[in-house]
Amino acid sequence: MSLMKTHLHSFHEEHGKLVEFTGFEMPIWYKGVVPEHMAVRNSVGIFDVTHMGRSLFTGPDAGSLLDYLTTRVVSSLNLDQVHYSTICNESGGIKDDLTVYRISEDEFLMVYNASNRKTDYEWAVENSTGFDVQIQDVSDEIPMFAVQGPKAEETLQTLTTDDLGEIRRFRFGWTELARLKTLVARTGYTGEDGFEIMPWNVPLSKPSEAIRLWEEILDKGKPFEIKPCGLGARDTLRLEAGMCLYGADITEEISPFEARLDFVVQLEAGDFIGREALARQKKEGVEKVRIGLKMIERGIPRPGCLVMDDETEIGKVTSGTHSPILQRGIAIAYVPVEYFETGKTLSIRIRRKDLKAEIVDFPFFDIGEYGWRRKRD
């Protein structure tokens, strides 16, 4: 079976190291994970995230359907607003995490994970009976790039006459970037300031305009030493920021409360799929919880490594890597809720050795030095 490709495949093939990812052929890196990671933390990088899923919900009941499908109220969004949310199953387990944009009174855009492109769309259609709404999968009609880092705004500003500084965090606007009508949202998956951009009506069958926009952004970013970035840096950046990866840190066996995503669950807002189970869990409490672990001893934790309290196995690592910023191993894991105490020392079993690690808050980095809340000069 041949792998799917994004609009930028010819660029990735020429410049990147390609791997299979959720059915797509995508770059894991171009020059290396660490230099790409550091470009985003210190200046600016650009990612091709076109492999993610995108669907338009249009019609009088579009907001009501999304209120029912997701755990957070969509119908109250402002016209230029985007929010992060989850889709749950009837048991309260997370089917996916996603973002929702309110484009007009009766039109919304949902962006979800590449691994769930087919299943999320089918789930929405399956549950739309009785709602006056049209659902259109536009994943192949609208490419998507992420321009991330403290110099992201300056880079993109050179391509438009509109003031991108007016777009606040988790808001979006419309502009022309390199002569293409583009949705520009101040969002991202790195913990840094930056934008996710979607040039409208650029089909996969005619990728030249998407390639032109990508190359113009790279050209305008040269004064800031912009780097194209692959999946490797995307993963290390999001992990440093304490963000969840679907299929690893969140699954259908994990609820938003267990993942410490309480803010996406609005039980008081009305009925939605999984509400009854989540209301019960909210009342009774959770048994396990997602934590951050920073290595005290030298070692790199990987998914599946055991989390130990003395000789007792209490959990497993779901994501782990070497942090380029901290210069030490970091991990996300689930442990029984009674072990969740910031500053507490546990161990991670790495290559048959139990190495000490400390429970820390998310994000892993100092928010005064890195991330969208960093101190400005």
Image: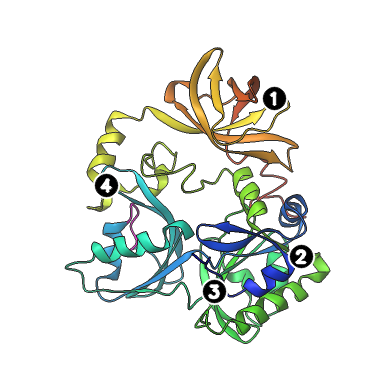
Q: Please, what secondary structure does the residue beneath circle 1 have?
A: loop
Cα–Cα span, label 2 and label 3: 20 Å
Q: Nearer the viewer, mark 2 or mark 3?
A: 3
Cα–Cα span, label 4 and label 2: 43 Å
Residue 251, given in percent of the width and then of the height, sits at 41, 44
Mark 4 and mark 2 lie on one chain; the one further toward the N terminus is 2
Residue drawn at x 35%, y 30% is 286
Mark 2 and mark 1 lie on one chain; the one further toward the N terminus is 2
- Left or right of 287? Residue 186 is right
Residue drawn at x 69%, y 39% is 322
Cα–Cα span, label 2 and label 1: 33 Å
Q: Please, what secondary structure does the residue beneath circle 3 have?
A: loop
The amino acid beneath tag 4 is Gly
The residue that mark 4 highlights is: 274
The residue that mark 2 highlights is: 226
* Residue 72 within the magenta-colored segment of the rendering: yes
The residue that mark 1 highlights is: 296
- Is residue 34 visible from the viewing direction of this image? yes
C-beta proximity under 8 Å, tags 1 and 4: no
The amino acid beneath tag 3 is Pro
Q: For the residue carrying disc 4, how many other residues have a C-alpha within 10 Å: few (<14), some (14-19), or many (20+)?
A: many
- Is residue 75 visible from the viewing direction of this image? no
User: Which span of residues is magenta-colored?
Assistant: 70-74
C-beta proximity under 8 Å, tags 3 and 1: no
Residue 139, given in percent of the width and then of the height, sits at 46, 72
Q: For the residue carrying disc 1, how many other residues have a C-alpha within 10 Å: few (<14), some (14-19), or many (20+)?
A: some
The residue that mark 3 highlights is: 143
